[in-house]
Amino acid sequence: MSSQATRVLNSQQDELDSSEVAERELCFRAFDARNCQFPAPRVPLLPRLTSVSIGLSTNRTFFPIVADTPYRFYSRGRYALHEAYSRAGVGAQGALLVPAYHCRTMLDPAIRLNGRVILYPLDERLAPRISSLARLIERSKTPVRALLLTHYFGFPQNSGELHSFCQERGITLIEDCSHAYFRHQNDGNLGKVGRFVVASPYKFSPAEDGGVLIANQGATDLPESPEMRGFSEQLRSVARVVRKNLQDRFQPDSHAVDGKLAKSGPIDFAQGTESLLQAHQISAMYEPWVENKSGLLLSRLIVQMSDADRIAEIRRANFKHWLHAVRGLPHCRPLFDELPEHVVPYMFPLYIEHHAPHFSALKMLGMPIYRWDEMAVSECPVSQDYRLHLLHLPCHQSLGQAEMDWMTGLVTKVMMEIQES
Ligand SMILES: Cc1ncc(COP(=O)(O)O)c(C=O)c1O
């Protein structure tokens, strides 16, 4: 990163005035875990390649959102987003409305296009606060060209309402199905409303990569097919997949966890540091050379051979297992307290009241956790709060009973036995 464009601010000394935030350059609040020395997660965050995911049954209740529609296959959703933003007119003359609760890769493609990013607020269940959108659009000096609507954790948003809102204002609606790859046969809307739809099949199938771009106005709205990867890259990917799947299998260590917990108090868990980072620059997770490159052939094959019904069934059972396990636990609550019939969940979102010491304790004990702790500063209190307090926990189809029991048992022990600092 260039030192001119990037400034690291100490969050204690140089807080931003929230009323200025919308008119400023993007500024990220970031959690740095380098001094924590967290071990590698003991359970994979995304599905492994096992026979559980694969099957070609035709008697189906769930369908991938690409069924019966033209699409393009990229390496990741972020590169499909780049194409969607660009086609919608995001750039120096066109702004993008993005939900304030986000990961860096939702913003990177707009930054790469030199587009202005406007963060819009969400309610506690991560639905857009539609009443704020009109004010943000009026206030923007750059015309708003596109709005990203994210179906978080696989739970479909009310896209019809936003579709009308965008249509009245000539704004392109882009549905972000990165967490929502499978549609129930009775759910007519998921991935069918936005002019463009972007998805990340590698989060649902045990593939190394894979990002999808759908155009609901038809194939003529799509770009040319992305460039195929070279032969040696394809071969290397096969070797990587084989190697990864030969790695050691999970062994529960409940006694070791009990021992560590018995010996530890809240101060024994390193807490990491916080900083403010001012930068209208892409993150290290966005690689411009991968733009317009196709996903790997092996990934495409695995995604196409994935059994939607079986994946849906196991993910739904694991999500319910989590719901049952955290019911009544102190210091935490599920973001969604039930699982509607048509939802195929991506992960299980768990709100924790005390980032310290519970997040660090879980990480130190090997819990697999995603958390969007590097997030742009916004006027949305929910997103600012969720940055450190919302954990994304795995519920994918290749988790065995022992892994689910170990994870739910660990969360239970940490919440019950470690007092807040
Ligand atoms: C909600 C959401 N949208 C978009 C993306 C970008 O997807 P990908 O990882 O396929 O680039 C992510 C990445 O995790 C995401 O969580």
Image (cartoon, rainbow, N blue to C red):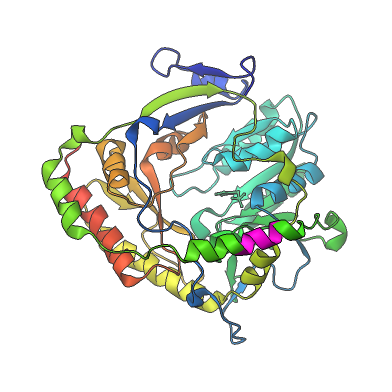
Q: Looking at the image, which is closer to me, 65 or 206?
A: 206
Residue 374 rendering spot, x and y as whole percentages = 49, 34
Horizontal side of residue 257 vs 56, given as left or right:
left
* Residue sitting at x 57%, y 81%: 55
Left/right placement of residue 195 relative to residue 99 reads right
Q: From the top left corner, tell me how far across and down residue 242 is, in percent.
A: 54, 66
Q: Is residue 52 visible?
A: yes
The residue at 34%/41% (across/down) is 38
- Considering every residue shown, the one lying at the far top of the view is 13
Left or right, 158 with respect to 394, comes to right
In the displayed structure, 288 sits above or below 72; it is above
Figure quadrant of the N terminus: top right
Q: Is residue 327 visible?
A: no
Give the quadrant of the C terminus: top left
* Residue numbers of the magenta segment: 233-238
**Viewer-closest of 61 and 262:** 262
Which residue is at the front of the view, 372 or 243?
243
Residue 278 on the magenta segment: no
Residue drawn at (38%, 16%), measured in percent from left and top?
12
Q: Position of residue 218 (x, y in %)?
A: 83, 63
Q: Residue at x 20, y 59 (%)?
A: 254
